[in-house]
Image (cartoon, helix red, strand yellow):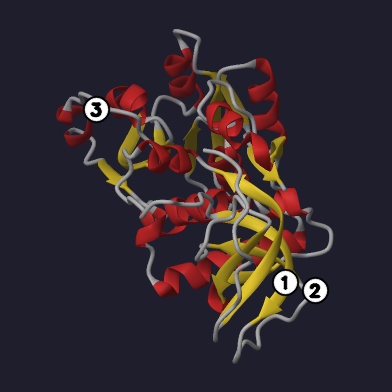
Amino acid sequence: MKLEDVETPKPSAGQVLVRIGAAGVNPADTYTRAGTYAIKPQLPWTPGTDGAGTVDAIGDGVTKVKPGDRVYLARNLSGTYAELVLALERHVHPLPDRVSFAQGAALYVPYGTAYHALAHVARARANETVLVHGASGGVGVAALQFARAMGLHVLGTAGTAAGLALCKREGAHEAFDHDDASYRDAILRATGGRGCDVILEMLANVNLGHDGELIARRGRVVVIGSRGEVTINPRDFMTKSASIRALLLWNVTDDEEREIHAAIGAGLENGTLRPVVGKEIPLAEAPRAHVAVMARGAHGKIVLVP
């Protein structure tokens, strides 16, 4: 990746031009860049799905926003790793004044994924126990906050002291060091031996083979992220009538997407959602951000600032 000057985009009918204040960096961006992701864009390609900033111009027929409005983006037409980005009107959403652009760039992919996993895929209910594996990353923090607001008993894992502290601060009732050889025993003790009703799995290639030990009867493991193959023992799930489910945010229906944004908007208004920004990196150093987002022990969301 390298920084280049391109022509300023112009919004057509139904489109919005947003001046980017910050762009979110997601692991999926690195997979797409490497050519290993399910979605392969045409080249040359400007990465970036998440972003936040101010409306610079609008095309004909746009009524939802006006120039100068603060917004966050959910999908776009030209890539958020840029000073200006084009988006459809329906993918531009209000950003409250108290939420920074860096925090706004941490919204759609992390919080959309977390809400979709909990509400639509796992169908989590208040009073259930949820384990967020890898809870100190962008999706993990979002899941902690949503789960706590939904009335679940929340457990989280991380691999550093700072990550464990972040988990506790952002909603986990208990946090466990996944580098401790006995951490799964500690999780089972914390649940009285019954296991977790829901497990949100950020690194399935490492953990899914053991999640069958931690899942409760009729529990649901939701695979959110994986970086390779894994071997499991189906009997661990069969004996408990438990299930393994999986998601890709791009597969949400229109109704689910509207629900996601309603939930994000409400959470930002009442303060239950507080995006955590781990690093702000200059746009020109996007390659460094792609290394950082895949590094072990990343905390919060990494964003690029034009």
Count of marks placed on residues = 3
**Which residue shows up at 43% across the image and 22% down it?**
188
Q: Amino acid at mark 3?
A: Glu
Cα separation between marks 2 and 1: 5 Å
Q: Position of residue 79 (x, y in %)?
A: 53, 56
Check disc 2 and report the residue beneath it.
68
Residue 39 as seen in the image, left or right of residue 296 = left
**Which residue shows up at 61% across the image and 40% down it?**
141
Q: Nearer the viewer, mark 1 or mark 3?
A: 1
In primary-sequence order, the first of circles 2 and 3 is 2
Q: Amino acid at mark 1?
A: Val
Q: Amino acid at mark 2?
A: Gly
Cα separation between marks 2 and 3: 47 Å
Observer able to see residue 299: yes
Q: Are marks 2 and 1 in contact (CB under 8 Å)?
A: yes
Check disc 3 and report the residue beneath it.
229
In primary-sequence order, the first of circles 2 and 1 is 1
Q: Which mark is residue 257?
A: none
Query: Residue 210 is drawn in which quadrant?
Result: top left
- Residue 49 in the image: above or below residue 19: above
